Image (cartoon, grey):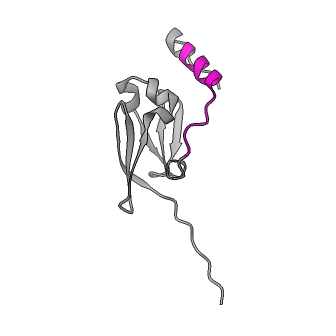
Amino acid sequence: MSSSATKLEPVAVHMDIDDTFLRLRLADGRELAVPLAWFSKLSTATEEQRNNWRWIGGGIGVHWPDLDEDISVENLLAGKPSGESQGSLKRWLEERASGRKQSS
């Protein structure tokens, strides 16, 4: 007899963010808090920028359009902080300070 397991992606249904933590409540009842310091763009963003977010894929991730930042629930559960390099962050901060739009 064979069985196939269906992998269900973790889905967030609620999020809070402040100067210190990103907190998610998942559909299955788990709650997760990660340090904002894991995500350089979020930790340097204004409150207004941090609060301008939307769900990706119905809650499998979060997107911040002002920051060009995407974070998946799966990576948070795995304990993976942002992989952004310091050079990339520095360029982004310089572009943000000068008012230029970041090129892709």
Where does the image place residue 42, in percent across and percent down from the top left? 46, 30
| Magenta region, main secondary structure | helix
Where does the image place residue 104, in percent across and percent down from the top left? 65, 26
For the point 37% across and 33% down, which residue is it?
A: 20
Where does the image place residue 57, in percent across and percent down from the top left? 50, 50
The image quadrant that residue 86 belongs to is: top right
- Answer above or below: position of 73 versus 87: below
For the point 47% across and 32% down, which residue is it?
A: 37
Q: Is residue 38 magenta?
A: no
- Answer above or below: position of 93 versus 67: above
- Answer above or below: position of 85 versus 91: below
For the point 50% across and 52% down, which residue is it?
A: 77
- Answer above or below: position of 72 versus 2: above
Residue with the most extreme top position: 98
Residue with the most extreme bottom position: 1
Where does the image place residue 19, in percent across and percent down from the top left? 36, 30
* Quadrant housing the N terminus: bottom right
Camera-side residue of 45 and 98: 45
Camera-side residue of 60 and 89: 89
The image quadrant that residue 102 belongs to is: top right
| Magenta residues, start to end | 80-94
The number of numbered badges drawn on the structure is 0
For the point 62% across and 78% down, which residue is it?
A: 4
